[in-house]
């Protein structure tokens, strides 16, 4: 549960980015030196900007103080593997992975920058959306120096009216995501913590179809999600019924 203190902390982080002297036109989308979601979360976890983008060995850490490193990765966790390999040897590393829970789509004129319309997306995200990415960091789970934080946030997603069709929305550019609130922070330190990523509606024994419905995924994303849970031992393959593979949720230690 988020507190009033957390909300104040987010507001300070938001203002540090969106109303920064480095962004003189205020909330004019596109003036930021880095993506807004990444930048705001960096200030949320480390308000002191002098501790941002610190070189540690051959890498730049998003934030660093003493022996603690904070990395914000909004997508593609695999891209962090080499950096994590180096950092977790000598530093306490917090990896933050945000998930958009509620999204408002803002359509922007690419020439003027004016917002032409805003509409709340019916699609709702959840912490389970992180599962397909986690296979990339499974080797770090249980490491003393490694902690994962999955956050759920609300965002305004800005899309340019530069696509195809009469309304120019088909295959339009997804330009920017600006966080408007932080809804939850869930921390994962060892294998048992990841039981939180198994939907409570999933039966003890299940098929891939059951799993897909529970996590609201399909295709490659669902396969990667299930593979991650198999790899870390929270789910077991127990055999076949006809042509269907049957899995079960492993008993918690």
Image: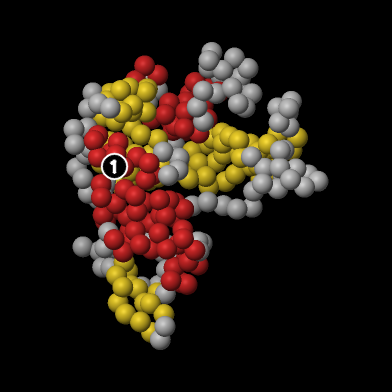
Locate residue 189 relative to residue 153 in the image: left or right: left
Q: Quadrant of residue 112?
A: top right
Query: From the image, which quarter does the N terminus lie in?
Result: top left
Q: Which residue is mark 1?
A: 147
Identify which residue, 1 or 207, lies in the foreground. Answer: 207
Question: How dense is the environment of label 1, judged by Cα within 10 Å: few (below 14), some, or many (20 and up)?
Answer: many
Residue found 61% across the figure and 40% down from its top = 174
Locate residue 139 relative to residue 42 in the image: left or right: left
Chosen colour scheme: secondary structure
Query: From the image, which quarter does the C terminus lie in?
Result: bottom left
Q: Is residue 57 above or below residue 193?
A: above
Q: Quadrant of residue 78?
A: top left
Residue found 31% across the figure and 42% down from its top = 81
Estimate the x, y position of residue 215 in percent, counting from the top left.
47, 61
Identify which residue, 60 or 191, lies in the foreground. Answer: 60
- Secondary structure at numbered mark 1: strand
């Amino acid at each position: 549960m988020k507190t009033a203190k957390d909300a104040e902390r987010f507001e300070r982080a938001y203002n540090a980015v969106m109303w920064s002297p480095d962004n003189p036109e205020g909330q004019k989308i596109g003036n930021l030196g880095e993506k807004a979601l990444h930048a705001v979360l960096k200030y949320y976890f480390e308000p002191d900007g002098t501790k941002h983008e610190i070189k540690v060995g051959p890498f730049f850490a998003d934030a660093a103080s003493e022996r603690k490193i904070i990395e914000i990765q909004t997508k593609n966790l695999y891209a962090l593997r080499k950096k994590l390999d180096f950092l977790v040897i000598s530093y306490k590393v917090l990896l933050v992975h945000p998930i958009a829970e509620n999204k408002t789509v803002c359509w922007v004129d690419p020439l003027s920058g004016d917002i032409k319309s805003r509409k709340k997306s019916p699609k709702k995200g959840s912490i389970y959306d992180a599962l397909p990415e986690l296979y990339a960091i499974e080797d770090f789970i249980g490491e003393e120096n490694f902690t994962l934080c999955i956050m759920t946030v609300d965002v305004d997603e800005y899309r340019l009216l530069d696509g195809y069709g009469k309304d120019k929305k088909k295959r339009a550019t997804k330009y920017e995501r600006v966080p408007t609130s932080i809804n939850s922070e869930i921390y994962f330190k060892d294998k048992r913590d990841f039981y939180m990523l198994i939907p409570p509606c999933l039966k003890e024994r299940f098929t891939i179809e059951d799993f897909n419905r529970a996590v609201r995924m399909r295709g490659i994303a669902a396969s990667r999600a299930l593979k991650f849970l198999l790899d870390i031992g929270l789910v077991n393959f127990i055999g076949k019924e006809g042509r269907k593979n049957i899995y079960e949720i492993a008993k918690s230690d």
